[in-house]
């Protein structure tokens, strides 16, 4: 009988973009994989890949005590009835609710995947809410089950270890969710008259969109550089308290400073068409998929010296690290890359070498399969 793994994620599209290769590799290695997540319309697509699907009404961006309690009860019942060998909780809310749900079933092994600590642990987060979240994490991690916690950056790892939430020997470190280096192959930066600068993410203020807009205005108005297009790709996230409204993004677009594409499906093509990648985030990132994919395609990067982002840039070799919220310095670094086509080419080649060294999805998948196998070996 195949060993059963439950992967618990807050929404199906995040699973598809960040965890699908792990699930498919697990199936290939003989595991029976069930996804527990909120169905946003991708269920049929996921089931066609051989992954079982259980709809769970997670609310990503708000805390509703009644809904959270009902989800906890549903998870506990599922764990009791189905008795999976491993439950793999991804992101904060599934880790907390899943941790409480699994504690009465010590024979179930637990993997908790920290893909960034979110806005609560950024400079924008409420200290009271952060304290509350730490208490919940501490209690939900205090279980008798075999436990491994997978981190994407050392800053997040230090926060949870230093706060007594997890022991260092229980931790595993992977650099991001990985990228398929064949699918996101190296594309040399083309020499052309107009330069395209790209920022892609959900439309949240802590992702640095306002700083991007202000830097773009600075380049065009103060620096007098006009052979450049500033492009934003990303969908609205209206339920998130840090959301940028459609009215605001349309206003930024109306003065000709930026162009908003909305949600972009083909990131390979969009990154390849761009000359410079900007990601001025001060959000609690894991390692942003956008930056990993941009490294793989071979693009120079400007991002913040902030947990999760800084892991993708070697200062002055494949890009620049800037202070969070400083659009003036962002504009200065942009000027160097906009005017320096040779520099863009040099930085782009270095980005690709960094991706080959650190960000292969095969390496990330192997690390996860290793954790799964260790649990099952210990259970024999």
Image (cartoon, rainbow, N blue to C red):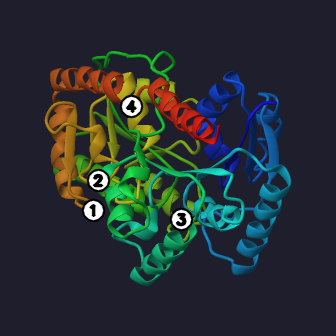
Quadrant, the C terminus: top right
User: Mark 4 or 2 closer to N-term?
Assistant: 2
In the orientation shown, which residue stands out farthest toward the bottom? 128
Relative to 141, is 236 above or below? above
Real-space Cα separation, disc 3 to disc 1, in angstroms: 34 Å
Above or below, 238 against 304 in this view is: below
Q: Earlier in the sequence, mark 3 or mark 2?
A: 3
**Of residues 83 and 272, which is closer to you in this image?**
83
User: From mark 3 to mark 4, how far is it between C-alphas?
Assistant: 34 Å
| Residue drawn 26% across the image and 59% down it | 324
Say what secondary structure mark 1 lies in: loop
- Regarding residue 264, the answer to whether it shows in the image is no
- Who is closer to the viewer here, 363 or 189? 363
x, y (%) of residue 208? 37, 57
Which label sits in the foreground, 3 or 1?
Answer: 3
Q: What's the distance in space between the residues labelled 3 and 2, CA to CA? A: 46 Å
Closer to the eye: label 1 or 4: 4
Number of residues whose C-alpha sits closer than 10 Å to that of mark 1, classed few (under 14), some (14–19) or many (20 or more): some
Residue at mark 1 to residue at mark 2: CA–CA distance = 15 Å
User: Which mark lies nearer to you, 3 or 4?
Assistant: 3
Where residue 32 appears, x then y in whole percent?
76, 34
Q: Which residue is mark 2?
A: 217
In whole angstroms, how far apart are the C-alphas of marks 4 and 2?
Answer: 24 Å
Residue at the spot of label 1: 325
For mark 4, what is the residue? Answer: 294
Dot 3 corresponds to which residue? Answer: 141
Query: In the rendered image, which quarter is residue 78 located in?
Result: bottom right
In the image, 289 versus 98, the foreground residue is 98
Foreground disc of the pair 4, 2: 4
């Amino acid at each position: 009988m195949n060993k059963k793994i439950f992967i618990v994620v807050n929404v199906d599209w995040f699973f598809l973009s960040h965890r699908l290769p792990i699930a498919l590799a697990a199936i290939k290695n003989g595991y029976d994989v069930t996804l527990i997540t909120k169905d946003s319309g991708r269920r049929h697509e996921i089931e066609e890949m051989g992954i079982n699907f259980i709809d769970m009404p997670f609310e990503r961006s708000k805390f509703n005590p009644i809904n959270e309690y009902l989800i906890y009860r549903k998870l506990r019942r599922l764990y009791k009835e189905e008795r999976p060998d491993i439950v793999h909780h991804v992101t904060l809310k599934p880790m907390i609710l899943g941790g409480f749900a699994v504690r009465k079933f010590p024979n179930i092994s637990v993997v908790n995947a920290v893909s960034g600590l979110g806005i609560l642990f950024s400079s924008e987060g409420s200290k009271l809410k952060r304290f509350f979240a730490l208490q919940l994490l501490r209690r939900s991690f205090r279980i008798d089950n075999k436990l491994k916690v997978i981190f994407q950056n050392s800053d997040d790892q230090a926060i949870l270890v230093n706060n007594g939430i997890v022991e260092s020997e229980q931790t595993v470190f992977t650099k991001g969710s990985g990228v398929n280096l064949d699918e996101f192959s190296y594309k040399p930066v083309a020499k052309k008259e107009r330069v395209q600068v790209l920022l892609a993410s959900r439309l949240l203020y802590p992702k640095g969109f306002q700083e991007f807009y202000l830097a773009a205005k600075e380049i065009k108005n103060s620096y007098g550089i006009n052979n450049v297009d500033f492009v934003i790709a990303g969908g609205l996230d209206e339920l998130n308290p840090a959301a940028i409204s459609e009215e605001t993004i349309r206003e930024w677009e109306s003065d000709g400073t930026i162009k908003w594409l909305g949600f972009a499906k083909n990131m390979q093509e969009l990154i390849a068409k761009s000359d410079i990648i900007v990601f001025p985030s001060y959000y609690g990132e894991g390692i942003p998929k956008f930056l990993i994919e941009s490294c793989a395609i071979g693009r120079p990067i400007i991002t913040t010296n902030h947990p999760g982002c800084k892991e993708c840039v070697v200062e002055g070799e494949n890009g620049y690290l800037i202070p969070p919220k400083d659009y003036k310095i962002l504009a200065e670094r942009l000027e160097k890359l906009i005017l320096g086509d040779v520099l863009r080419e040099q930085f782009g080649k270095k980005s690709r070498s960094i991706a080959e060294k650190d960000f292969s999805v095969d390496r990330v998948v192997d690390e996860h399969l290793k954790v799964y196998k260790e649990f099952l070996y210990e259970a024999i």
